[in-house]
Image (cartoon, helix red, strand yellow):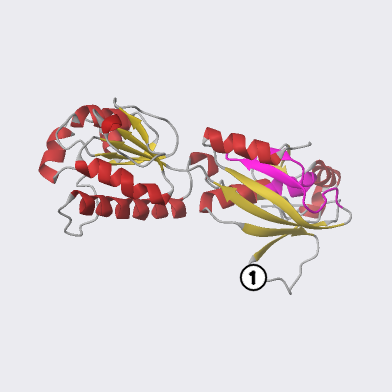
Amino acid sequence: MNLNWIQRAAELEKEGKPFALATVINASAPTSAKPAAKAIITGDGKMEGWIGGGCSKEVVVEEALKCLNAYRSTILRVTPQPDTSLNHSVKEVLLSCESGGTLELHIEPVLPVTKLLIYGSTPTATALAQMAYVMDFDIHLFGAGVTEIEMIKGIQLEEKFQSPLGRSIAVVATQGEGDIKALKAAIKTDALHIFFIASRKKGGEVTAGISPEDMDKIKFPAGLDIGAVTPEEIAVSILAEIVQVLRSQDSAGFGEESKETSMVKDPVCGMEVNPAKASHSVKHNNEMVYFCCEGCESQFTATPEKFADIA
């Protein structure tokens, strides 16, 4: 399909949806893909654009989801012929499908900007918003009187507690002024973590009625223990902890959409196939066998005895 990838990428970024951009950097015939061809792969495994059909498409989709999961780029080589001289940074997948061509692609994950939701108009809340600005967060500050405070242009200010959706981190910095209301608003968001500025004793009392499921996202006292005293120092400790948990989240993956699934091997070409998405399969000896494409399925169906060593 003809894809205006710049426009589509802008739309996905505006919607706050993660995606991977796959670009063909080299192609050796016979293959239908051409260098500079691009495709977008969204977190649900759907591809928009054209970088080659058949086996290569499935390989690229699976690798794109892995890139989203690991928050890393990769160079992928899909080929029937291994190349022992390859740089260690290139990932090679061997295929023996009928096309016989070789593709090299650069796959880059593009992730939405994380919202930083700050609840409260306290000195710590405003100091946190100002300091976080240079870290490229999409900052939202909620609380009575915040629109009257002189803040850096670009920080979103709301007099009432709101619950915006999208990838976010929330900090409840109300410090006694609407703690419960702010926590409830934060819980309604998609926040990965909710940091509550409160002592262990006070935090336990305030959150006593919150469900265990919601409590799994709430952490108090907020911030790393650096001996912080002033609002600015407390803000630094919270930002340090936010960086820590986000980097930890990076290594764990983006979420349910991009988690890797259990793969099985196509007995004909040896390619790894996702059973949940495979469109070609047959039942053999009371077990399902999955294939990357129609060609592999046809070969197996014609002479299954040739592929006796199936998983």
Indicate whether residue 51 is drawn in magenta. Answer: yes
Name which residue lies at 86% across and 44% down.
302
Q: Quadrant of residue 121?
A: top left
Q: For the residue labelled by badge 1, is the local secondary structure a helix, a strand or a loop?
A: loop
Name which residue lies at 62% across and 46% down.
20
**Left or right: 233 as drawn, with respect to 271:** left
Q: Quadrant of residue 124?
A: top left
Residue 30 picture location, percent across and down = 89, 54
Q: Is residue 75 above or below residue 191?
A: below
Magenta stretch in the rendered image: 31-60
Indicate whether residue 62 is drawn in magenta. Answer: no
Q: Is residue 163 above or below residue 152?
A: above
- What residue would you read off at disc 1? 88
Residue 251 picture location, percent across and down = 45, 55
Residue 71 picture location, percent across and down = 52, 53
Q: Is residue 141 above or below residue 246?
A: above
Name which residue lies at 68% across and 71% down.
87
Residue 219 picture location, percent across and down = 25, 44
